[in-house]
Structure formats: structure tokens, C-alpha cells
Amino acid sequence: MVLLTGGGTGGHLFPALAVAEELGRRGHPVFYLGAEGGLEARLLPTTSLPHALIPAGKLDRSALRPKEAWKVLKGLLAARALLRRVRPKAILSTGGYAGFPGALVGELAKVPVLLHEQNAKPGLAIRLLAPLAKGLALSVPTALPPWMARKARITGYPVREVRHPQAEAKARLGFDPKKPLLLVLGGSQGSLELNEKLPPLLKPLGLPVLHQVGERWVERYRHLEGEAYRVAGFVDAPLAMSAADLLLARAGAGTLAEAAFHRLPALLFPLPASLDGGAQAANARTYREAGAAELGDYGRLAKQVEGLLARPEPYREAMARLSPEGAAKRLADWLEEYL
């Protein structure tokens, strides 16, 4: 039995689900431990994956609030009871506040724990769990203290490994296959900042644009639609990235991993560090330093778009070097070392 734990957001949940699928194909029983109120609370009941949801307090970067501290304690007690019942031989934690209780209880019970860090800057849960963990799987090359680096391997971030021919993908989405397509993504929920700032800058360029504004913002931005500018609440990422010639997006780990798999050059607009502790800024810096992306600049966006569309190959090649292809298999291989 392998226990998978992590969630709260899609960035933590979806890599674990990809590994669960790979382990299932290999015949290993899997159990998922998630958090009440996280994204997994909505998605796991729609799957056949055995699972449980427990309280999980949010680990604050600066202070632990009393209400959240109580949730952390309740989560640890619930995780201990669950581990006594399912008795896993190994645990994979993909981090986030949902991935902390089960992994910590497992470590204290001497169960081998493997951690997966999606971002270029390790989150608080991963940093707290790392001292007792058997290994640390990284999505991208990451600067680590020596004691953490000795436990680390670069495995990549598991994504849906589906590609479509570009002309076919553009046609399926209703765009002219002969024209370059810009894809705007603000994460699964959409980005109010990108929704407000990018359309006035992109529409004058006269290029086809597919803009994922987020389900909650669709009606608010419906007025943007025209012959070349399309608005969607949510897009099928493999199809959209197969069709696109340039991505304009936040710098979430999942979005960047998918872009790397599709060899898609990107202009990045990371969240401010005050909102995510600097994780997206670190992701964007990693991809920029690798030559795979540029930091978006609203003041000279037109020139940036023109430049990347005119010379995409170096960015495509750099994205290919960062591609997470085979990440779920590599993580499953590592877990099998403990089974």
C-alpha cells in the first residue's frame, strides 16, 4: 500500500493523482489522504480512488494562528488513526498544508516518506518534512542547502502527456492554422490582473488570442470577444498548448511544466511574493535563466510578443530541456524502492 497525500490546490493535487494512476497500472494499491475543504474534497469523490479527508491547518509563513494550530493538531491525530488502519509501506507527499499531517505521522512511525516539490522554491510544509524524509523529488533544478541536496533528485512535474499536431489543434479550437496563436492563462481560477491588463495591450496587435479568464470571470469579460479574441472560463490545456505559439501566464509550477512538455515559449507574470512567498517568482527566474521564457513587461509587451514569435526556436529548445516527460514513472520507480 502506498499512501499519497497533498492538496489544497491543483498544483499539489494533480501530480499526486498522476502518480496514483501510474502506481495503479503497476498493480500497487493506493490510498489518498487529503484535506477537508481543499480541491481534493471536490475531485476525489468523482474518482474510484480510495481516500479520506482530514482537518489540515494552513501553515502560515510568519505565524501560526490559534485556529489553524488547532486544525493542525486535529489533522495529526486523524492522520495517526488512518495510518494505523491502512498501514502504508511508503508515503508520497506533494506538499501544501494537506500534505503535512500524513507525512509527518508517517515519518515519526518510520514509514519511508518521499516528498515532491513542485516549485523552484521549497514550500514551508516540504521544509518542515525534509529532515526526516527519505528523498526529495524536484520538478526543476533548485538551489538547496547541502543536507537537502543529498536527498534530492530531479524527477519533473507529472503532467498529462498528450500532444496534438498544431494545425489540427488550432482548427479544433476554431482558429486559423496559418496564424500565430497567443494563449493567456491565469491559472485554473483565472487572474484578475491578467484579465484587466493584457486585453488592451494584445487586441491592437491583431493576432488570434485564446484567453482563459477563469469560470467566475467569464461573463464579466465576455465583451472582449471578437473575431480574433476568444474568451473561455477554462481550456483543455493539452489542446490549447498544442495549438499555441506563445504563452502569456502566471508562473505556477503546473502551467510551466505543461508549457515545457509542449515546448511552448512563454512570457511570465508571476504572483507577488507577498501572496505566495516568492514561489512563482522563483519559478519564473528558473525558466528565464534556462532560456525558456521571459518576464513579461506591460510597458513593452508588443515588442516582447513580436520578438518571441520571430525567434521561438531557442525558447522551444530550452523548454524541451526542462520537459517533465516521464515524471510520473520516475516518481513511481522511486517509491517502488521502498515497497
Image: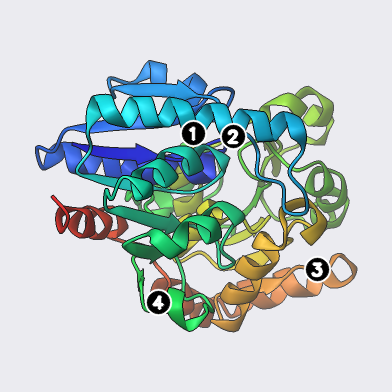
Can you identify the residue that label 4 sits on? Answer: 321
Estimate the x, y position of residue 106 in percent, counting from the top left: 34, 44
Query: Dot 2, how many residues are within 10 Å of its Cα: few (below 14), some (14-19), or many (20+)?
Result: many
Which picture quadrant has residue 181?
bottom right
Estimate the x, y position of residue 336 in percent, counting from the top left: 15, 53
Disc sitting over residue 72 in the figure = 2
Q: Amino acid at mark 3?
A: Ala
Question: How many angstroms separate mark 3 from mark 1 (CA)?
Answer: 51 Å
If you read the primary sequence from the N terminus, does the residue marked by circle 2 or circle 3 appear first?
2
If you read the primary sequence from the N terminus, does the residue marked by circle 4 or circle 2 appear first?
2
* 291 sits left or right of 325 in the view: right
Q: Amino acid at mark 4?
A: Arg
Name the residue: 45% across, 62% down: 130
Q: Secondary structure at mark 1?
A: helix
Disc sitting over residue 76 in the figure = 1
Can you identify the residue that label 3 sits on? Answer: 302
Disc sitting over residue 197 in the figure = none
